Amino acid sequence: MARRKHESRIRVAAAEARDQVHALDAAVFSAVASTPSPVLDRWMPKLTNAADHSVLWLVIAGGMYLTGRSRARRGAMRGVVTLGVTSIIANQLAKRLHHRVRPIRALVPIGRLSRRTPFSSSFPSGHSASAAAFAAGVSAELPAAAVPLHVLAGLVGFSRVATGAHYPSDVAAGLVLGSTVAAIGRRLVPPVAPPVVPAPRELDQLRPRPRGEGVTLVVNPASHSGRGAALSRSLRRALPKMTIIELHEGGDVDAVMRRAAAGAEVLAVAGGDGTVAAAAQAAIARGLPLAVFPAGTFNHFARTIGADTAKRTVQAIRRGTADVVDVAYLNDKIFLNTASVGGYTDFVRIREGLEKRIGKPLAALVAGWRTMRKDRTVAVTVDGTTRESSLLFIGNGQYEPHGFAPSVRGDLQDGLLDVRILDVSSRWSRFVVLMATLTGQLARVKQYHEASAPELEIALPDGPERVTRDGEVGEASDLLRLRAARRALTVYRARHGD
């Protein structure tokens, strides 16, 4: 008997709470709807109509994608996906579970009414849910867009009350739903962390060379579809005293670099990462500073050392500003960015071909899936433990983010190698890795191993495999002797802000 009385009191209290919420809803709705305002009459119908069928958000997403910026494109994609999931939940699930009659629109001035008269359940507001979902989804990848998009989402929600489509609590529930779906999405697929930008540090001062005196440039004129040749012409004008040597197809790059270094005070190079690595080897052997001009397809090393444009490198040579950075060796041969055996080369090629179109996180997933489907594994032994490796990554310096989509380095002076091993040799391991990647738990599964050390040996017990350094395929080996050479290379670097 006591239990039934307790349950009855709970039901009565819940009913009273619902009545109070409805009364408050009706009062706020009446106040907004009956308020004479030319501003509301003019702008609220336009805003709510623009958000019909999520057209407003899709147009914004399209504009973001057309900027070509990777973060903007990732934000647009996340926003649209989050909006789509939220719309399905709000319109196909939530509205069916709780039917609520729409407000009476007699109080709303005729000029303020939206062009569509909705007949579905009033609870929750689908427009508000989609608005909050898009704003929160985009903001996860592009924090700079958070304030304007959330303000716009709030205005869309308010417009649903002002035009007589919803009660305020419908809008509030929609905003909460959209934000919740976006938060779950961030948990399942974490946004890409912004690039790690090291704090500006004091640079070394070398002899200024305002006209390129004593500088010998080795340029690959065919690099990046002829970009090297165009760069060579512009550098002749910028540094007229500089000596320029052109590489020819089929020539011995290492031999050309050694000859150029022998007669130079400064060795400069314009080409892709493989060419830059050969120049770095020659510069270290002769004790020369290296000037890097980006002329390849991706220019990973040039971007890392702050030589992302030819103008910045020219400025550094003219002023004599330089820095010292680490290099790494695999079997006593240099690499500046990454080395690998097995399928990682295929992974990088596929990812980099897609990332400008769909963003790096999604491109990494697609590249990983395509590489995994090849069923190619290599047995590797590290620290006495043998693992099957589908993808083996070795980095010069610590890369971010952790997990198997290493992208950027914040520092090239840590004296460490970054080793990552991924095993997807079976269907079960592929499933585990896919789920772990989506939930941000890759570091916790046994199919993934990550290590860092200044020196390391990796044995390949099943026999020799081709080695790749900085995208260049090299010799076959069954033992990888790896070491980081800390601050071994002096490179020209422009001052922060130049």
Image (cartoon, helix red, strand yellow):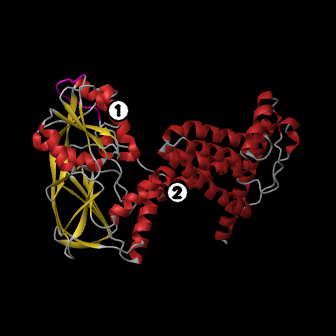
What residue type is disc 2 on? Ile
Rendered residue at 35%/46% (across/down): 223
Mark closest to the chain's N terminus, 1 or 2: 2
- Please tell me which residue lies in front, 48 or 258: 258
Above or below, comparing residue 253 to residue 314 in the picture: below
The residue lying toward the viewer, choosing from 325 and 24, is 325
- As helix, strand or loop, the secondary structure at mark 1 comes to helix
x and y, in percent, of residue 280 in the image: 19, 44
* Residue extent of the magenta highlight: 199-210
CA distance separating discs 1 and 2? 52 Å
Q: At 70% across and 64% down in the image, what residue appears?
A: 8
The quarter of the image holding the C terminus is top left
Q: Which residue is mark 1?
A: 233
Main secondary structure type of the part rendered in magenta: loop
**Where is residue 292, by image quadrant?**
top left
Image location of residue 159, percent across then percent down = 73, 40
- Can residue 289 be spotted in the picture? yes
The kind of residue on which mark 1 rests is Arg
Front-lying residue, 195 or 31: 195
What residue is pinned by disc 2? 184
Give percent across and percent down for residue 258: 15, 44
As drawn, is 474 to the left or to the right of 127?
left
Q: Is residue 25 magenta?
A: no
Q: Residues within 10 Å of mark 1 (few under 14, many from 20)?
A: few
Q: Is residue 414 visible?
A: no
Please tell me how crowded label 2 is: few (under 14), some (14-19), or many (20+) other residues with Cα within 10 Å.
few
Seen in the picture, residue 478 relative to 279 is either above or below; the reply is below
Q: Nearer the viewer, mark 1 or mark 2?
A: 1
- Residue 202 is covered by the magenta coloring: yes
